Each structure stands twice: as structure tokens, then as C-alpha cells.
Image: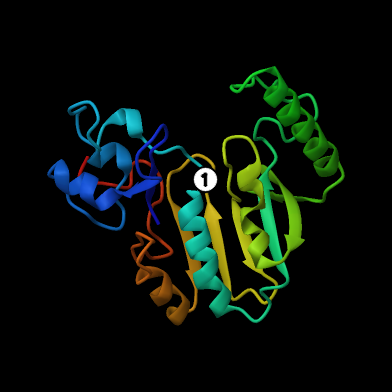
Amino acid sequence: MRVRDRRGGGPAFLAWTPIAERNGKTVHPLMQFNCIDGLPVEEGRPGTRRDEPGAGSLEETCLHALVDVLSGHTNTFDSCWFCLWEGYGGLTPGSAAYLGRGGAEQAAREASETERLQAEYADAPRVKTDGREYILFSGHLNAADAFMKFPDNQSLNIWWPNDHAWCVATEIDLQSTYVGGSAACIDSVLNHPVLEAFPVNPGDRIDFGSDTINC
């Protein structure tokens, strides 16, 4: 799934397909944003580098849509596992200083909330994979958006239900989210009106060099 976040006004997100089409690029499952956005165009128009999506997080509207889809493809929606990379600024004590954008009072409130979360995360179990360490949480599927309240609206990196019916992964350095599941589950994701999704194979490249058509 590929979502381009537009901050500072305008729609919450814009699919990559119209950006690629506007810039004369080919829409395909392995396209990468740096290969379809083209050169900067007129100020205020979509498809410029100033609107490039952030890495490692799924836009909130699409996260909610994905939760809605996946809830129908598991028998353990009330028992799920969530992994969040511990390297994000502010997750561990002393790892970041907060600079408020809404005045001293708001900065103090958000700094206090960050400190509370840091204390809560300090004793949480960890999961290690591929040289990275993640903080592990468990809960109802509807809790998948809990971290969107954290500074910078960070979504989970890896999450799955206890029955292993599907798994969602957003690599911290990349701009796409991947879903693995049954044929029926993936078909529901591909056909959801909010989600821009493409079928891929387990052996497909997922790095920034995977778009050999547009780059």
C-alpha cells in the first residue's frame, strides 16, 4: 500500500497513481516515489518533492481502513501483537528533547506525556529481528492506532493477530506497507476503496532501487 501524506492543509493523503500519471510514469506494483514524482512542478500542485511521503509509517486514514478490512479475516481480533521500533526519538528515556510548536503549556503537556510513555515502554518486552529491536505490545486489533497519538503520528512497524491469519509490516526506512495473508484477505485489501494496493510476490525487491521501469 502506498500513501503520500500531505501536511499543512489539503487532503490527508493522495494516492501515488495520480502522481505517476501526472508525471508520465508507469504505475506498477514495484514503483517507488522517488521514481514517479518527477521534477518539481508548480507550487501547490501534487507531485513535488516537497510533498514526499515520510518513511516507516502508514497514514492514519489508511490505517483505520486496513484495520477494518483485517478484522474480518481473523478469529483473534481481540488478541493481537504489535511491534514498534525502539529507535524512534522519544521512545526511550533521554533519547530526545521535545520542542513544542504550540506554546510553552502545550510543550509541557506533550513532554509530560512523552515521559509517561517512556516510563511505560522501559519495561516492555523486546523482539529482535534483522539487526533491529522492537518494543512488543499486545491488545485488541482496534488498538493498532494507539501510537498515532505519539509525536509525528507514528504507526506500528509490524503487527499480527494471535492466530497468525495475516501480518502487516512497514519497514522503517521505506514508504510502503506490506500485508501477507490468505487469498481472500489480500483480495479484500486490493479492492478496498480507500487503500491503494498492488499484489506483490515474496521474492520481489522492496528497496528504493526496485522500480526499474521508471528509474
- Residue 31, position in %: x, y? 29, 49
56 or 213, nearer to the observer: 56
Task: Identify the amino acid type marked 1.
Answer: Ser
| Image vertical order of residue 164 relative to residue 101, above or below | below
Q: Position of residue 42 (x, y in %)?
A: 18, 27
Q: Is residue 149 above or below residue 161?
A: above
Query: Residue 91, percent across and down?
Result: 72, 36
Quadrant in the rendering for residue 70: bottom right
Asked which secondary structure carries label 1, the reply is loop
Q: Residue at x 52, y 60 (%)?
A: 64
In the rendered structure, the answer to whether residue 191 lies left or right of residue 88 reads left
Q: Nearer the viewer, residue 110 or 197?
A: 110
Neighbours of disc 1 within 10 Å: few (<14), some (14-19), many (20+)? many
Residue in the image at 33% along x and 42% along y: 209
Residue named by callout 1: 57
Up/down of 174 relative to 166, above or below: above
